[in-house]
Amino acid sequence: MATTTTSLGAGGEDRVMATAQQIVKSLNTPKEVREDMLLILSSFDNRLSNISDLINNDSASTGVRFDAAEKVILRWDSSPSNPDSSHHSLPWEDSPDEAADYLSAIDEILQLVVDMSIRSDNEIMDRAETAIQIAMSRLEDEFRLILIRNTVPLDAERLYGSIRKGSFFITENDEEFGEEFESFGDADSERGCLHERGVSLGDDLSVELINADAVIELKEIADRMIRSGYEKECVQAYSSVRRDALDESLVILGVEKLSIEEVQKIEWRAMDEKMKKWIQAVKITVRVLLTGEKRLCYQIFNGSDTIREICFNETAKGCIMQLLNFGEAVAIGKRSSEKLFRILDMYDALADALLDFEMMLTDEFVLSEVRGVLAGLGDAAKGTFVEFENAVKNEASKKPMQNGEIHPLTRYVMNYVKLLVDYSETLNSLLESDEDEADGLQSEEKELETVTPFAKRLLLLISSLESNLEEKSKMYEDGALHAIFLMNNILYIVQKVKDSELGKLLGDNWVRKRRGQVRQYATSYLRACWTKALYCLKDEGIGGSSNNASKVALKERFKNFNACFEDIYRVQTAWKVPDSQLREELRISISEKVIPAYRSFMGRFGGQLESGRHAGKYIKYTPEDLENYLLDLFEGSPLVLHHMRRKST
């Protein structure tokens, strides 16, 4: 043994000593046990005879290392127990070297504890725990301060500059309709009321939530706090600061903290603005804020999946619940027809958000709350649609349109349902099919190969409108005006269907049937209006052939025709047929029936009066005059002919 020791030399002896020390140290035994094991080893090999010095040196080195680390930590202790400290916060940004020294001191103590090299010394262990506690309190403050100082406020102007808005018209009337259709506004207005569908976000839209340089510092602090067992405090510090930042972002987006009672007291125009801002805020919160927040959580707490999930859930919960509070208030609020589009927008926005929430969050309470508010908005939309159906069915205004124009109810309802087509998918999921309602469909409507729940309800809704218009037409004592009114309104319905996606839902057969009704009403108009005038141009009852007809009877016939035509002209120039094609077709139909009959009657009997005195009193108009005067009908501007006479008289 001695020979071997000599031949190894001093270097070999050092290696043996180091190996022995490493073996014992790796056993993770208390200091006293390690010392005993090294002493036992020294009794077997004289190369370990100086083991006592080694032990003493190791202990001294550990103490020096601990003292140095502790001193750094205590130097920054601002607690009442350390009144000598003049430091109230670490100069993390101004003195990165000192911040690095502070973190190194924490690492040193944590490593000494992990290595078990101070576990046997109760006094040092107590000091280590105190130092770690002081350091964690300081790091928590620094963590919070760095988060606050480096939070980037939401730039709403830049954000809105990069998103797209969609708009469409909700009604052609200036004034809003009451939920009971108490007033219909100005039916002649074509200016329109704009309904904005809200924002459409680009796929690459993102914002910076925190200055990028600060993320590394935050991660370094978080790593130490987690290693020290202070992950709860770290998560609380992070989530409290970031919750406030997200709340501030919602304020910037126009979402206020309002109670349900406060929301329900807001008048409609202001409420509509708040609903629009809510829809935008939901989309931006999901696509921009929470997406960025989750990315930030993963950067700072990337060492633990559990911690970063907890942190994100805690951070996101506040702003999500604030958004849900407003959604719930809308869902249980008073229903009226003008709210339906905005409620559907809210429903769609939250339905899309739910898919993202389910991927982002693991907090089942929050997810269940989202689902509950979504269901509430769905019920509100469905209930509002049902109330709209009932309002259309039961609207009972008794004031007829004086000129037979399109009724404001028709305009409102058709523009309303035309816009609802944009929500077909949503409404199909909300409006369940009902067999009793199916029984109310007309036979040709049942022949449609596929009738979706929404299409079925549209068929019933428009059918209710048509029935209501039929009742309103009975207020006209003049049968011709009754027909004009129905012609105008049914054609308007047909045009709104043909010029939109409604046509695909209701089908060609539905359109053909309504066009047939318009033709029937035109025939009814001609019969009700022109039968009396045409009777004046018949041969019966004028006492003989064209050569010896009674002049008295002829004069009476011409006189009656003139009076009849002038009365029609006076009245029907005031009537309104807005559609130019229908207006022209009506004039042609009148001309085809009246002008040939008048020309024929004049050809047979006009000569007997033209040779007599005061002929112009009876034969006041040529066929060409009548044709020209017919062009003035249905323009909505009353005119008279009683002062006009033929120039030849």
Image (cartoon, rainbow, N blue to C red):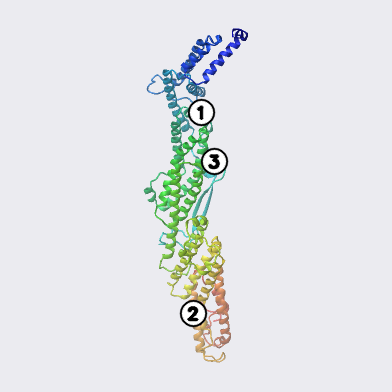
Which of the two residues, 141 or 432, is positioned nearer the viewer here?
Answer: 432
Which of the two residues, 48 or 440, is positioned nearer the viewer here?
Answer: 48
Residue positioned 41% across, 53% down in the render:
268
- Residue 206's disc is 3
Residue lying furthest right in this view?
7
Q: From the viewer's perspective, is 48 left or right of 477?
A: right
**Number of callouts:** 3
Mark 2 element type:
helix
Mark 3 element type:
loop
Residue 520 visible to the viewer: yes
Name the quarter where the C terminus is drawn: bottom right
Q: Which residue is mark 1?
A: 220
> Few, some or many C-alpha atoms within 10 Å of disc 2 (few <14, some 14-19, many ≥20)?
some
Answer whether labels 2 and 3 touch (C-beta < 8 Å).
Answer: no
Percent coordinates x, y for residue 377 in the rendering: 44, 52
Query: Which numbered disc flags the more N-terminal residue, 1 or 3?
Result: 3
**Location of residue 386 by image quarter:** bottom left
Q: CA distance from mark 2 to mark 3?
A: 75 Å
Mark in front: 1 vs 3: 1
Q: Amino acid at mark 1?
A: Glu
The relative height of residue 548 versus residue 489 in the rendered view (above or below) is below
The relative height of residue 83 versus residue 169 in the rendered view (above or below) is above
The relative height of residue 605 versus residue 625 in the rendered view (above or below) is below
- Residue 564's disc is 2
Name the quarter where the N terminus is drawn: top right
